[in-house]
Amino acid sequence: MRTVHSLKELRAILRGYRQQEKTIGLVPTMGNLHEGHISLVRKAAEAADIVVTSIFVNPMQFGANEDLDTYPRTLIEDQEKLSAAGNTLVFAPSADEVYPDGLARHTRIVVPEVSDGHCGASRPGHFEGVATVVSVLFNMIQPDFAVFGEKDFQQLAVIRKMTRDLMMPVEVIGAPTVREEDGLAKSSRNGYLSEQERIIAPAIYQALQTTSEKIANGRDDFPVLAQEAGDSLREAGLRLDYFNIANSQTLKPAAPEDREVTLLAAAFLGTTRLIDNISVTR
């Protein structure tokens, strides 16, 4: 496995693979990798001959007072995990390589509608930063496939719409959420949790499961269900950001006639913001 930091070197290597008619899969990450990320690498390897994992802590998707400066940078450990997983190439560019004219002067991608609400409402500009950096990575690497985790359900929807709307020749693949034994979705930010917070954190998944069971049993009073779930999270000791029930395709508030709905939740434990979701077919 090789690690490169420049676009010039990256493209030279990928040109050689393409000359061999190899297909290329991309797994975009911000590093500090855990088993959830590694599952994306394995899924990419099922689809493509060559797997490129990018490691870039993207400043454009962090808002004011978020954890850009403290976000863990663990390149050496990440390289070891990726090598063991059979990854082919690591691309770890600097911010100057991705945004050569600086953030303020860089062209930005706005994906309407699916970026609204949920995390888009809580983190203004976040999905603009996500869509922009993913479009840059797609153009840098020109993959045939790109794999993203379903834990970030709204992010996946944003990327799928962007790819479709801009006619990008990339097949976007969603991969199931990887969880701890107690149900907590694996996340790089879980490492911020104190011992006591870590005990409380699975309440998010429990609330999602309980609500999904109520829907499966026939309830369709979605605003009331969301209120009940939010109350349960507050009682467990979390500070609720949102608990929403949405149409799985549009991410707009679910209606009783919707057959596929997704429950999306975000909450804080201390300063740590956790997100999760479950989809239900009715």
Image (cartoon, helix red, strand yellow):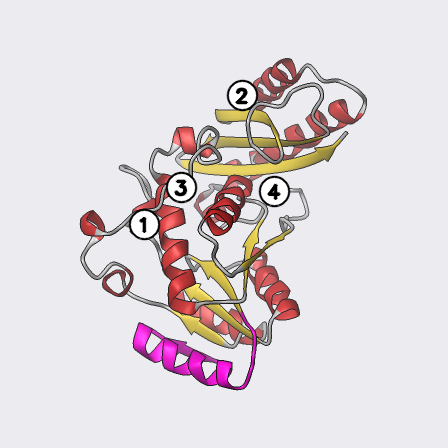
Look at the image and give the residue range highlighted in magenta.
1-24
Q: Which mark is residue 234?
A: 2
Residue topped by disc 1? 70
Marks 3 and 1 sit apart, C-alpha to C-alpha, by 20 Å
Whole-percent x and y of residue 193? 47, 42
Q: Earlier in the sequence, mark 3 or mark 4?
A: 3
State the quadrant of the C terminus: top right
Residue topped by disc 4? 184
Determine the secondary structure under disc 2: helix
Residue at horizontal 47 percent and vertical 75 percent from the top: 89
Q: Is residue 202 above or below residue 191?
A: above
The amino acid pointed to by label 1 is Thr
Left or right: 198, with 55 as reference point: right
Marks 2 and 1 sit apart, C-alpha to C-alpha, by 27 Å
Determine the secondary structure under disc 4: loop
Residue topped by disc 3? 127
